Image (tube, rainbow, N blue to C red):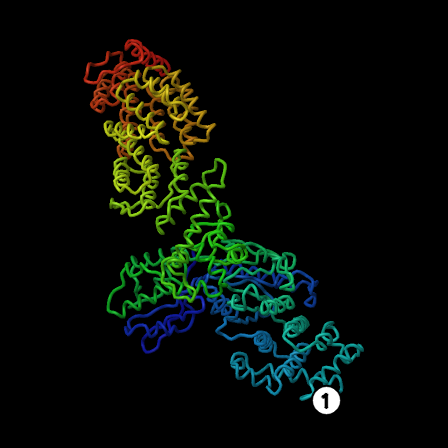
C-alpha cells in the first residue's frame, strides 16, 4: 500500500516544535512527545507529526459503517432481536507498532469533527442520524474494568442525547447501589475523570429517570434511598401489565433483568436495555454510536476469556451500535470451537469475521455481511521515506538525510515502530554532537522483542523463539523444532499477526522479517530470555526435524529437498552442527543438475570466504555449485580450490568438489588440469567415478582421439550417461542421424529416471545436430529444448540451444554475424570458453552455405586460432570440409572413426543440401 501522509500543525513551546507523542503502538500521534521534547537542546530542531492516512482502512471503515446504518434504518430491523446474525463489528489487527492505536484515535477524531479528518481520506457519503464516537483504550495501563466500559458508553449517549434512558438507568442504579454501597455514582465519575470528559449529564438523567418511574407508579416517596423497593414495584407492575408502565412494557426482558442478581454477569446484559432505549428515541434525537475498542489484546489471554466474554455481550446486545476493534490478534468469535467459552460463536453468528487476515482492498466497498477482519499491513518504501522526511526537521528541511533514510527504511521492513525508535536514536546520537551515519543503524532495538512477547504465554514465547530459526515452517515442523508434544501453542501462535502466511508456499508460515532478525540478533532483556545453550539446543532440534522431513519425502518434487537444504545448511553453519543428513541431501541436489540456489549469494567483492568448520565448507561448496551457472568459470574454479584446500570437507564431498573443479577447468579450456582431476576422481571409485570417466571421454574427444573416446564410452552404461556421450562422438563424424538417435535415447532415459538437467542437456544437443540437417525439424526440437530448460538453471546448455538456432538459420538470415557476436560476448562473460569453437563452427557453416569463400576462410582461420592448443581442433577440420577443402596439416592430427574423405563428404553434403533449401 502506498499511503499519503498527513502533517498536522506544529506544536510550539518556547520556540521548540514538539513531536507527536508515542502511543501504545509506537507511532506518532497528535499531542506532545515528551521524550522528543527533552531529547535535544537544539531549538532549531523541530518535528512534524507524521501520520499515514491509511486511506484503504478508512475506505473499509466508511463502507462498513454505511452498510451498518442502512441495516439499522431498515423497517424490519429490531434492536431487541437476540438471534439475528451481527454485522455491527469491524476488526483491524496487526503486529505491535503498526499503527492500530493511531488509526483508532484518528477514526474517533474524524467522526467527532470533519476538520480533524485527514484531507486525503475524503468526505464520507453516509446520511442519517448523528455519529457519536466513543473510544475505549483497553490497555492494562489504563486500569480499565468492565464497569467503566459500560459507564463510558452510557456517558457518551447521555452527552449526545440529553435525556434519560429509564430502562437502562434504573437497572444500572440498582446494580451500583448493590455493588458500591456508600459510594455515590457521581463521586466515582468525578474521581475517575469521566465527568471532565463527558460532563455531569448522566447523574441528572439517572435521577430524572428514577423520578419519572416513581411518579408513574405513584410512589414518589421511594425516590432516593429505596431503589430496591422501586425496582420491585416496577417489576410487579410489568408482570401485571399495568397501563401506567406501558412505555417500558415494550422492553420484554426488563423485568427479568431487574430480578437477576446484581453482578458483572447481569451488568453485561444491561446494554440490551440501552440498545432498546436508543431504538425508541424520536427521529430528531436519533444517534448512531460508534464504539472503538482499542488494544483489545489486553483484555486477557486466549485461555481465560472472562473479560472478552463480557465485552462480546455488549457487542451482541447492541446491534444498533457499531463497534471497531483494534488489536494485535485476529478476533476468533467466528470460530465454532470457542463455543462454551463465548456465548455467540461461529460464522453464522458473525458474518465476515471468519475470513482470514487479508489486507484492506485497494478499491471497492465492504458490503453488508462482507469481510470484517482487516490486517493492517506494513508501510511501503514510499511510506517509510515520507515518515522519516517529515518526522524530524531543522530549519524547515528534513533532519535525516536521504542516504540515512534509505538505510533506516530498508532495516525497518515497513514496521512503523522501528521507524519511530530510529528517530529517537537519531536524537540520541545528535546529543553527542555527532551526525548520525548509516552504520549507527546496523543494530536492532531490544524494545521490539519486549513489544512482541508482551502478551504471549510462556509456551507461545518458546515456540516463537524456536521458529525464528527457520525461514518458513508448518505446524508439525514448528512443533518439532520447539521440542513439544502438542500443537496447541503453535496453533495459538499462528493466529498472531506477526506470523505471515503464504498459502501457495511449501511451508506456509514465516515470521515478520524484522521481528525475526530482532529476536535472533538483538540483546534480549526479558525474564525468560534464552541462553546460548538454549539457542543451540533449539537449532539441533530444528536440524533433526528438517532432516526427518527430507527423509520422509518421496516423489520428484525438489521443493522439499531445497527447502530442507537451505535451512539445514544455515543452521549447521551458524551453530557448528554435524552435517549428518546434509551429506546425502547434497548428493541428491547435484544428481539432477537443476542448480537452484540453496544458500545466500556470496559477496561480489571477491573476498575469500573464511572457512572454519565442515559446515562452512559445505555451504561454500553448494553455494559455488548453485552459482556457477551465473558466474565466470574462473570464479567457480577459485572458490572450489579454496574449499578443497581447506581440508574441512568429508571425503565424499571432497570428491564432489574435485569433480566439479575438473569440469570448471574443462570449460575454461584447461584440459591438462581437467584431465588430472577427472582421473583422480575416477581412481577413487566413488559415486562420481562414472561421471569422471565420462569426463575423460570428453577430453579424449576434445583432443580428436575419437577411437579411444568411443571405446571408453561404450563401457560407461547408464550411470555414465553413455548415450549422450555417444552422440557427442557421432556428430563430428557427420553422422547426424545416429547422433540424434543417441541423444533421443539419452533424453528418454533421463525422463524415466526424473533427471531434469540431463533431460534438458540431451535435448539441447539433439536440437544442435538436427539443426545442421533439417531446419524444419530443428524448429520443434529447439522449442522443446527451451521448454525443458525453463525449470533448470544450465547456462552452458542454454547457450548451446542459442548456437543451434544460428545453425538452423544458416544461409537464410543476414543477421547471423550480429547474433554470433552477441553470443560471443555472453560466452566470454560467463567464462565458458569451451563453447567458442562451436560458435565459430556455426558461423563457418553459414558462410559455407552462402558460398562466400573469403568470409569462410576468415572464419576458419579464427577457429584454428581458438583451437591451437589442440582442444576442439577437429572443428577446424570440419569447417574446412564444409568448404570442400582438405584439412590443413597441423600439430594436432585428428583420429576419425572413418576415412577422412568420408567425413569430408558428409559435411559437404550437409552444406549443399542446406544451400538448396535456402535457395
> Toward which corner of the image does residue 228 lie, by quadrant?
bottom right
The image quadrant where one finds the N terminus is bottom left
In-image side of 292 versus 534 (left or right):
right
Residue with the most extreme bottom position: 221
In-image side of 840 versus 320 (left or right):
left
Residue sitting nearer the eye, 554 or 54: 554
Q: Position of residue 732 (x, y in %)?
A: 32, 17
Write down the residue under mark 1: 220
> Toward which corner of the image does residue 776 lie, by quadrant?
top left
- The residue under the point 50% across, 38% down is 554
> Toward which corner of the image does residue 899 lie, by quadrant?
top left
Q: Does residue 785 appear anywhere in the picture?
A: yes
Residue sitting nearer the eye, 397 or 640: 640
Residue 550 higher or lower than 742, as above or below: below
Residue sitting nearer the eye, 457 or 894: 457
- The residue under the point 38% across, 49% down is 571
Q: Does residue 360 appear anywhere in the picture?
A: no
Residue 62 higher or lower than 243, as above or below: above
Q: Position of residue 107 (x, y in %)?
A: 50, 66
Secondary structure category for the residue under label 1: helix
- The residue under the point 25% across, 36% down is 634
The image quadrant where one finds the C terminus is top left
Residue sitting nearer the eye, 8 or 473: 473
Q: Position of residue 42 (x, y in %)?
A: 28, 73
Residue 823 higher or lower than 281, as above or below: above
Q: Position of residue 210 (x, y in %)?
A: 68, 84
In-image side of 303 versus 437 (left or right):
right
Amino acid at each position: 500500500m502506498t499511503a499519503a501522509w498527513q502533517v498536522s500543525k506544529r506544536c510550539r513551546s518556547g520556540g521548540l516544535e514538539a513531536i507527536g507523542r508515542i502511543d501504545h503502538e509506537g507511532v506518532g500521534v497528535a499531542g506532545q512527545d515528551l521524550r522528543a521534547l527533552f531529547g535535544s537542546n537544539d531549538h532549531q530542531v523541530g518535528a512534524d507529526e507524521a501520520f499515514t492516512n491509511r486511506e484503504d482502512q478508512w475506505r473499509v471503515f466508511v463502507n462498513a459503517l454505511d452498510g451498518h446504518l442502512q441495516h439499522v434504518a431498515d423497517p424490519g430491523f429490531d434492536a431487541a432481536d437476540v438471534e439475528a446474525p451481527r454485522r455491527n463489528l469491524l476488526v483491524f489487527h496487526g503486529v505491535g507498532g503498526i499503527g492500530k492505536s493511531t488509526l483508532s484515535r484518528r477514526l474517533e477524531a474524524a467522526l467527532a469533527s470533519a476538520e480533524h479528518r485527514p484531507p486525503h481520506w475524503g468526505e464520507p457519503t453516509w446520511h442519517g442520524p448523528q455519529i457519536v464516537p466513543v473510544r475505549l483504550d483497553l490497555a492494562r495501563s489504563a486500569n480499565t474494568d468492565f464497569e467503566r466500559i459500560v459507564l463510558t458508553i452510557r456517558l457518551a449517549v447521555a452527552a449526545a442525547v440529553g435525556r434519560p434512558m429509564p430502562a437502562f438507568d434504573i437497572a444500572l442504579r440498582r446494580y451500583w447501589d448493590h455493588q458500591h454501597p456508600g459510594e455515590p455514582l457521581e463521586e466515582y465519575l468525578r474521581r475517575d475523570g469521566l465527568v471532565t470528559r463527558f460532563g455531569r449529564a448522566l447523574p441528572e438523567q439517572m435521577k430524572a429517570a428514577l423520578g419519572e418511574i416513581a411518579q408513574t407508579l405513584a410512589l414518589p416517596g421511594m425516590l432516593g434511598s429505596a431503589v430496591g423497593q422501586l425496582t420491585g414495584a416496577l417489576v410487579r407492575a410489568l408482570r401485571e401489565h399495568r397501563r401506567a408502565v406501558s412505555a417500558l412494557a415494550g422492553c420484554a426482558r426488563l423485568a427479568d433483568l431487574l430480578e437477576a442478581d446484581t453482578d458483572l454477569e447481569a451488568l453485561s446484559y444491561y446494554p440490551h436495555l440501552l440498545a432498546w432505549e436508543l431504538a425508541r428515541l424520536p427521529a430528531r434525537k436519533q444517534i448512531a454510536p460508534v464504539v472503538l475498542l482499542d488494544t483489545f489484546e489486553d483484555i486477557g489471554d486466549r485461555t481465560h476469556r472472562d473479560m472478552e466474554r463480557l465485552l462480546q455481550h455488549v457487542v451482541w446486545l447492541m446491534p444498533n451500535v457499531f463497534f471497531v476493534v483494534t488489536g494485535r490478534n485476529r478476533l476468533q468469535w467466528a470460530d465454532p470451537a470457542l463455543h462454551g467459552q463465548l456465548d455467540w460463536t461461529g460464522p453464522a453468528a458473525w458474518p465476515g469475521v471468519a475470513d482470514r487476515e487479508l489486507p484492506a482492498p485497494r478499491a471497492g466497498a465492504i458490503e453488508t455481511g462482507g469481510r470484517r477482519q482487516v490486517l493492517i499491513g506494513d508501510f511501503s518504501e514510499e511510506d517509510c521515506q515520507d515518515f522519516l522526511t517529515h518526522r524530524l526537521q531543522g530549519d524547515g528541511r528534513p533532519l535525516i538525510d536521504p542516504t540515512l533514510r534509505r538505510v533506516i527504511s530498508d532495516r525497518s521492513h515497513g514496521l512503523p515502530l522501528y521507524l519511530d525508535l530510529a528517530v529517537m536514536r537519531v536524537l540520541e546520537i545528535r546529543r553527542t554532537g555527532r551526525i548520525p551515519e548509516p552504520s549507527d543503524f546496523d543494530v536492532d532495538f531490544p524494545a521490539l522483542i519486549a513489544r512482541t512477547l508482551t502478551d504471549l504465554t510462556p509456551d507461545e514465547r518458546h515456540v516463537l523463539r524456536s521458529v525464528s530459526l527457520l525461514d518458513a515452517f508448518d505446524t508439525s515442523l514448528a512443533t518439532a523444532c520447539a521440542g513439544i508434544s502438542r500443537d496447541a501453542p503453535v496453533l495459538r501462535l499462528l493466529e498472531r499477526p506477526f506470523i505471515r502466511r503464504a498459502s501457495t508456499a511449501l511451508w506456509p508460515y514465516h515470521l515478520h522479517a524484522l521481528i525475526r532478525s530482532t529476536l535472533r540478533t538483538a540483546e534480549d532483556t526479558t525474564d525468560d530470555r534464552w541462553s546460548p545453550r538454549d539457542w543451540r539446543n533449539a537449532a539441533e532440534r530444528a536440524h533433526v526435524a528438517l532432516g526427518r522431513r527430507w527423509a520422509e519425502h518421496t516423489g520428484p518434487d525438489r521443493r522439499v529437498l531445497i527447502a530442507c537444504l537451505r535451512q539445514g545448511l544455515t543452521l549447521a553453519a551458524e551453530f557448528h552442527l554435524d552435517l549428518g543428513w546434509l551429506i546425502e541431501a547434497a548428493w541428491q541436489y547435484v544428481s539432477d543438475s537443476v542448480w537452484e540456489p540453496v544458500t545466500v549469494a556470496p559477496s561480489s567483492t571477491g573476498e575469500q570466504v573464511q572457512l572454519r568448520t565442515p559446515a562452512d565448507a559445505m555451504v561454500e561448496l553448494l553455494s559455488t555449485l548453485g552459482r556457477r551457472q551465473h558466474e565466470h568459470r574462473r570464479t567457480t574454479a577459485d572458490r572450489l580450490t579454496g574449499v578443497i584446500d581447506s581440508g574441512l570437507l568429508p571425503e565424499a564431498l571432497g570428491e564432489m568438489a574435485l569433480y566439479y573443479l575438473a569440469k570448471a577447468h574443462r570449460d575454461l579450456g584447461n584440459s591438462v588440469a581437467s584431465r588430472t582431476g577427472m582421473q583422480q576422481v575416477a581412481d577413487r571409485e566413488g559415486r562420481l567415478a562414472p561421471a569422471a570417466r565420462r569426463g575423460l571421454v570428453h577430453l579424449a574427444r576434445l583432443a580428436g582421439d575419437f577411437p579411444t573416446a568411443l571405446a571408453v564410452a561404450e563401457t560407461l552404461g547408464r550411470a555414465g550417461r553413455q548415450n549422450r556421450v555417444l552422440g557427442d562422438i557421432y556428430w563430428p563424424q557427420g553422422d547426424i542421424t545416429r547422433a540424434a538417435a543417441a541423444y533421443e535415447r539419452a533424453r528418454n532415459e533421463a525422463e524415466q529416471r526424473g533427471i531434469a538437467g540431463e533431460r534438458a542437456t540431451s535435448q539441447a544437443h539433439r536440437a544442435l545436430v538436427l539443426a545442421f540437417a533439417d531446419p524444419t525439424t530443428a524448429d520443434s526440437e529447439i522449442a522443446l529444448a527451451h521448454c525443458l530448460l525453463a525449470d533448470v538453471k544450465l547456462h552452458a546448455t542454454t547457450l548451446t540451444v542459442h548456437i543451434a538456432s544460428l545453425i538452423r538459420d544458416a544461409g537464410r538470415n543476414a543477421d547471423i554475424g550480429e547474433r554470433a557476436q552477441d553470443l560471443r560476448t555472453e560466452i566470454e562473460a560467463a567464462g565458458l570458453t569451451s563453447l567458442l569453437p562451436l560458435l565459430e563452427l556455426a558461423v563457418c557453416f553459414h558462410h559455407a552455405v552462402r558460398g562466400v569463400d573469403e568470409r569462410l576462410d576468415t572464419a576458419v582461420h579464427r577457429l584454428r586460432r581458438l583451437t591451437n592448443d589442440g582442444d576442439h581442433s577437429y572443428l577446424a577440420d570440419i569447417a574446412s570440409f564444409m568448404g570442400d577443402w582438405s584439412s590443413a596439416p597441423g600439430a594436432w592430427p585428428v583420429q576419425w572413426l572413418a576415412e577422412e574423405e568420408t567425413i569430408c563428404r558428409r559435411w559437404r553434403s550437409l552444406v549443399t543440401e542446406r544451400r538448396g533449401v535456402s535457395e
